[in-house]
Image (cartoon, grey):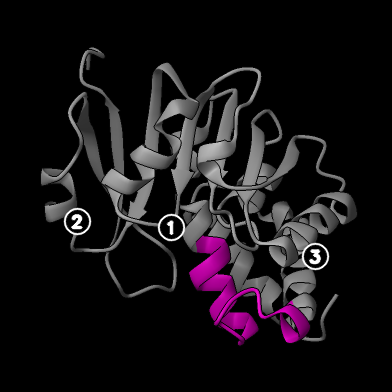
Amino acid sequence: MSAASPALRPELEAGLRELGLEPDLAGPLLDYLALLVRWNTTYNLTAIRDPREMLVKHLLDSLALQPFVRGLQSLADLGSGPGLPGIPLAIVTPTLQVTLVESSGKKARFLREAVRRLALGNATVFEGRIEAFAPASTFAAITARALATLPLILELGGHLLGPEGRLLAMKGADFEAEIEALPQGWRVAAIHPLRVPGLDGQRHLIEIVRAGLAA
């Protein structure tokens, strides 16, 4: 664990409470943060260097998605990078099977090490391009936090969704043009404003489903 991690525990526990999650989850989340901080010095996994900034903009931001995956069986995190939002979601939602999809070799190596070190039996890593991923079964949901526009996410990963599956895309404030450019056969099911503890900027979750799926 990094030296900064114990000092961050009270803020993380408060953020977890605000998100309706158990503060006891702070332990494994801080273990993940410490591993990310350590690997980031060598492998440049994220441009954010400050552990406290990582806590808010990575951990708590990812966990704001948790109410929307609760109850789902499977989730593919596309362009997972250092495991965001997939690893925090896997930590706090043990019934959710998370597949971390990442084409960068150094990031995929970190993901495998994080899954091993954190003993995440509900997380696996696919190293390769999203469009080349051909799993044995489809997913209840896919997510992408900072990957691409909504149309491109669907172009790359729409094949991973089952008939009733949905894209759960995290966006800031400007996404109207992306919605207008959605490919034929897809529609917006809901737009949810997200409250991320400690973050001033606007965050939204965009739920996208196949056009024929009932509300």
Percent position (x, y) of residue 157? 45, 37
Q: How many marks?
A: 3
Please name the predominant secondary structure of the magenta segment in the image.
Answer: helix
**Left or right of 80: which side holds 200?**
left
Residue 49 occupies quadrant: bottom right
Q: CA distance from mark 3 to mark 1?
A: 25 Å
On residue 175, the disc is 2
The answer to whether residue 32 is visible is yes
The residue indicated by pointer 1 is 147
Q: Nearer the viewer, residue 175 or 134?
A: 134
How many residues crowd mark 1 within 10 Å: few (<14), some (14–19), many (20+)? Answer: some
Image height of 178 relative to 214, above or below: below
Amino acid type, mark 1: Leu
- Between label 2 and label 3, give the one nearer the viewer: 2
> First in sequence: mark 1 or mark 2?
1
Q: Is residue 43 magenta?
A: yes
Percent position (x, y) of residue 56? 51, 72
Amino acid type, mark 3: Asp
On residue 31, the disc is 3
Q: Residue furthest front?
A: 132
Q: CA distance from mark 1 to mark 2?
A: 14 Å
**Left or right of 153: which side holds 59?**
right
Percent position (x, y) of residue 4? 75, 85
Image height of 111 relative to 3, above or below: above
Image height of 171 relative to 206, above or below: below
Q: Nearer the viewer, residue 94 or 189?
A: 189
The stretch of residues the image draws in magenta is 40-60
> First in sequence: mark 2 or mark 3?
3
Percent position (x, y) of residue 184? 17, 28
